[in-house]
Amino acid sequence: MQTNLFAICDAAAVTQEGKLVVHGIFDSIKAKQVPVIHPSMTVIFQIKDAPSIASLSLRLRDVMLEKTIQEIPIPSNPIIQNGKLGGVLNLVGVKLESFGTYKASLLINGQEIASTSFTLDKV
């Protein structure tokens, strides 16, 4: 199994031809104060040679507070094309409670297979 792509961005979509269109990959968010509600973010992923999947989920953690913010099951109908498992997950109204680092993890059958992080910085 190989993670080809795992990122957080402003928006993403898959065209009729199966092309992934990504807008605004980011690794930091700016805010004047906390808590702050981030209006929307999208998590994108693509995995080659994925194992048999019983469950697929996304975990978002506040690294500084060592706290899971959300664990979201990903629908059991991910995109499979040319032997690659891919998906686009839109998150709306994510509450970020402290400045610092946040980690997004992709889990297959409860095991972390990919992760990325972003920071919430004070303006």
Image (cartoon, helix red, strand yellow):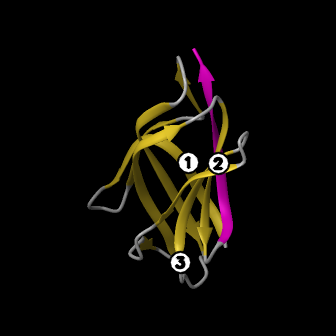
Q: Are marks 3 and 2 in contact (CB under 8 Å)?
A: no
**First in sequence: mark 3 vs mark 1:** 1
Residue at 48% over, 54% down = 44
Q: Is residue 76 left or right of residue 70?
A: left
Q: Position of residue 70 (x, y in %)?
A: 53, 54
Q: Position of residue 19 (x, y in %)?
A: 37, 56
Q: Which mark is residue 116?
A: 2
The disc labelled 2 sits on which kind of residue? Thr
The disc placed on residue 55 is: 3
Q: Are marks 1 and 2 in contact (CB under 8 Å)?
A: yes
Q: Is residue 15 left or right of residue 119?
A: left
Label located before the other in sequence (1 or 2): 1
Report how far apart the C-alphas of labels 3 and 1 lie in the structure.
Answer: 20 Å
Q: Answer whether labels 3 and 1 touch (C-beta < 8 Å).
A: no
Quadrant position of the C terminus in the picture: top right
The earlier-in-sequence mark between 3 and 2 is 3
Give the foreground label among 3 and 1: 3
* Residue 106 coordinates in the image, percent (x, y): 59, 62
Q: Residue at x 57, y 35 (%)?
A: 97
Specify whether residue 116 is painted magenta. Answer: yes
What SS does tag 2 mark?
strand
Amino acid beneath label 1:
Ala
Q: Is residue 51 above or below residue 70?
A: below
Q: Residue at x 44, y 62 (%)?
A: 87
Q: Amino acid at mark 3?
A: Ser
**Residues in magenta, as a range:** 111-123
Viewer-side residue, 21 vs 57: 57
Up-down: is 66 above or below 16?
A: above
Q: Secondary structure at mark 1?
A: strand
